[in-house]
Image (tube, grey):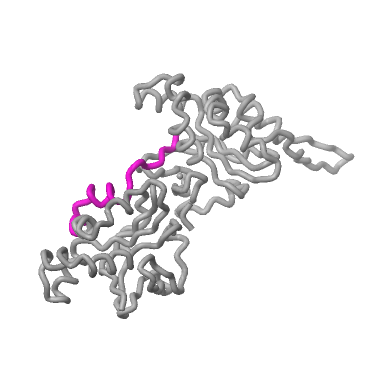
Amino acid sequence: MLKRTLLSLALAMSVLPLAACNDDDDSSVVIEAPTQNIAEIAAKNKDLTILDAALKATGLDKTLMSSNDKFTVFAPTDEAFDDLLEDLGVTSEELLADKELLTMVLTYHVIPNITLKAADIPYGDSIETANGQAFSISDANVIMDASGDTSDIIKTDVLATNGVIHLIDEVLLPTDKSIVDLAVAKENLSILKEAVVAAGLADALADEDANLTVFAPNNAAFANLLAELKITKEQLLQDKALLMKVLTYHVIEDDRIFASEITAGSQEMLEGSSITFNDKKQIIDESNRTSNILTANIQANNGVVHVIDTVLLPK
């Protein structure tokens, strides 16, 4: 489960030419099929020179030449890259030399295995990218990335032989924070952070190679649990075996499940037991307790976090 280009104004016109055919009083419009793949369109577009160079520097241009696969690419213009370079305080040469960073960023602009035209964009839903992380698009064609920044789609539906390109005015940035980093940064998850450390799970939840979905109880959820169990926080943190069992019951391994992908039914957890989602996307644990998702789709570089209002308990 677990394991997060390219548009041309001139070429768009050649990709989507319209030819009018008149026959006496009858006329029709013929839309010619695209003749260039995504990488070829990027290479010949004067507004995508940095993107083209970045694709070639990482070897992703060859991937986007494939005739056996379909891609949807959100292509930052040169102006978008110029803004990024200024924000980072680096030159284009320095950026192009960092192949690991480039690959992480570029794959965050690609949706594999689909030709997603503008009319088919699932507004408001999380859209998972080749990077593994996701972004969402509003009905105003504004993208919000994993870092919370936005980019406008300024041209849509440039068709290629292997997909479609949408032009955007800002480079999308995936997050570089791990699940543990997120817990540390959020005040309402401070008890969860303490519990993760006490259980010895911090390294596992910070592993960049992991691909996890975590349902994170907030501080109020833990306060209610302590009252229910009639113990103190200190007593809970000292019981490593209990912590391990409870915390791993909040983790789905090898998959990032975004809120839009949650469907009613059973879901096995890392602990080995299962939770159940109902039609309202509430979570029912094996003790028949119900938890609500308060904040969904908080993205990390190794998974996604959903904040919940009740600590889940296995039998």
Q: Residue at x 16, y 63 (%)?
A: 237
Left or right: residue 60 compared with residue 206: right
Q: Quadrant of residue 25?
A: top right
Residue 145's x, y, as percent? 41, 43
Say if 99 sits above or below 241 in the image. above
Q: Residue furthest right?
A: 24
On the image, the x and y values in percent for residue 117 come to 60, 46
The residue closer to the viewer here, 222 or 143, is: 222
Q: Is residue 4 above or below residue 267?
A: above
Is 9 on the left or on the right of 91, as rendered?
right
In the drawing, does residue 55 fall left or right of residue 302? right
Q: Which residue is drawn at the image coordinates 20% and 58% (left, top)?
A: 198
Q: Is residue 186 magenta?
A: yes
Image x and y of residue 176, in percent: 35, 41
Q: Quadrant of the C terminus?
A: bottom left
Which range is magenta?
A: 170-191
Q: Is residue 236 left or right of residue 91?
A: left
Please identify the quarter of the rendering in which residue 275 is found: bottom left
Which residue is depicted at the point 54% across and 50% down?
121
Q: Which percent across, then down, holds residue 197?
A: 22, 55
The reply to whether residue 170 is in sight is no
In this picture, is 174 found above or below 80? below
